[in-house]
Amino acid sequence: MQMVDTPLQIALEEKYGAHNYHPLPVVLSRGSGVHVWDTQGKKYLDFLSGYSALNQGHCHPSIIEALVCQAQQLTLTSRAFYNNKLGPYEKFLCTYFGYDKLLPMNTGVEAVETAIKICRKWAYQHKNIPENQAIVIVCEGNFHGRTSTVISFSSDPDSKHQFGPYMPGFVSIPFDDIEALRHALQNPCVAGFLVEPIQGEAGVIVPTDGYLRKAWEACQEARVLFLADEIQTGLGRTGARLACDHENVRPDILILGKALSGGTLPVSAVLADNEIMLVIQPGQHGSTYGGNPLACAVAEASITVLEKEKMALNAMEMGQKFRKRIEQLNSRHIAVVRGKGLMNAIVIDHSDIDAAWHLCLEMMQQGLLAKPTHGDKIRFAPPLIIMEPQIEEAVSILEKSLLILD
């Protein structure tokens, strides 16, 4: 193996790259399954999974085979022409999730923007809301991306400060507060309710059992669209096909991304039924790369792998074991353990405001990669193919690493 100077790699990014991230000081060069290796050949358990883009694991053979095979045939046509992969892929995904129509995009935030546009247009055409008066309800602590529209309704100052002016048309309410939602729905100009079934970036905030179902029912009663951002929570991550499935909720607009490509390239999708989706006509929305043949082939392979290998079931079982084992540590530095499936987090209790960061550095030294969010929280989201011995190894590393906080 060719050794690479790690400090040099980091220095190059610092010198030539925008400083919009603060990574752990590790330079990765290879991945397979639940593991990654750095440029010095050191092996790590990946407990971030590309923010859940790698549910199927690094370089899953079936996904890579689909990627390579299609890349040798046709990668892009743009939507100026038909291609032989898009139609079959649209049928596959619509059948899999039970919707009439799919609108393909690339990144997650593009899919969110798409869903907002569809929701507004539906409201003007079908709910007769006065032009330019449509309101979308969102939740405090949300994370739906960082475009100028999406940060307009963010409550994260880092995402929002000095990026204004902000787009109007959004009302923010507390997450997991059904009465606040019901009150907001009384406004006749409300077009939709955009929600993460579990708030990931906020620190894996899991709502009260029944909240999603009650929220969906309230939206149905008010004739308001329920928009589920399942970009991070979907595709097996929480132990079900979708996080909404845990409460038998069928979103009016379903937003997908991340693991839709198994971590190989940006692929996202918006699904809805005809009444909603067909408000969009030619020229009103699109993307040069959206629905490209390469993305279609990879996404279909990614979903097939999830289903064939029963990854959602494994996520449920391994997630329960993982949370139980962390709770058994009885560490005075872990204030909270929470999650669903393999979407988990701990909250660090320590006088040092950088304690979570230091803990992640120590875990990195011992072969476990995770990243803090919002200061005192650490997310743990390994690929869904992880097995019990690897769960035990990760908890053992966490236990040893916690000693630095004593």
Image (tube, grey):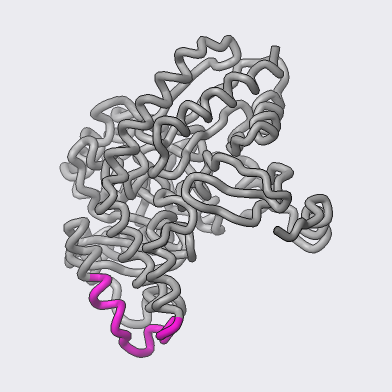
The image position of residue 296, as x and y in percent, is 35, 72
The image position of residue 57, as x and y in percent, is 45, 50
Of all residues, the one furthest to the bottom in this rendering is: 81
Q: Looking at the picture, tell me which residue is in the foreground, 270 or 69.
A: 69
Quarter of the image where the N terminus is located: bottom right
**Left or right: 233 as drawn, with respect to 140:** left
Q: Main secondary structure of the magenta part?
A: loop
The image position of residue 138, as x and y in percent, is 40, 43
Magenta-tinted stretch = 72-90
What residue is at 55 percent from the left and 23 percent from the top? Answer: 396
Residue 131 appears in the picture as rendered: no
Number of disc labels:
0
Give the quadrant of residue 4: bottom right
Residue 172 appears in the picture as rendered: yes
Quarter of the image where the C terminus is located: top right
What residue is at 39 percent from the left and 43 percent from the top? Answer: 384
Q: Looking at the picture, tell me which residue is in the foreground, 251 or 393.
A: 393
Q: Looking at the picture, tell me which residue is in the foreground, 402 or 332.
A: 402
Q: Is residue 274 above or below residue 406?
A: below
Q: Looking at the picture, tell me which residue is in the foreground, 274 or 123.
A: 274
What residue is at 56 percent from the left and 31 percent from the top? Answer: 378
The image position of residue 155, as x and y in percent, is 54, 39
In reply to whether residue 293 is colored magenta, the answer given is: no
Give the quadrant of residue 180: top left
**Left or right: 299 as drawn, with respect to 370:** left
Q: Is residue 130 above or below residue 335?
A: below
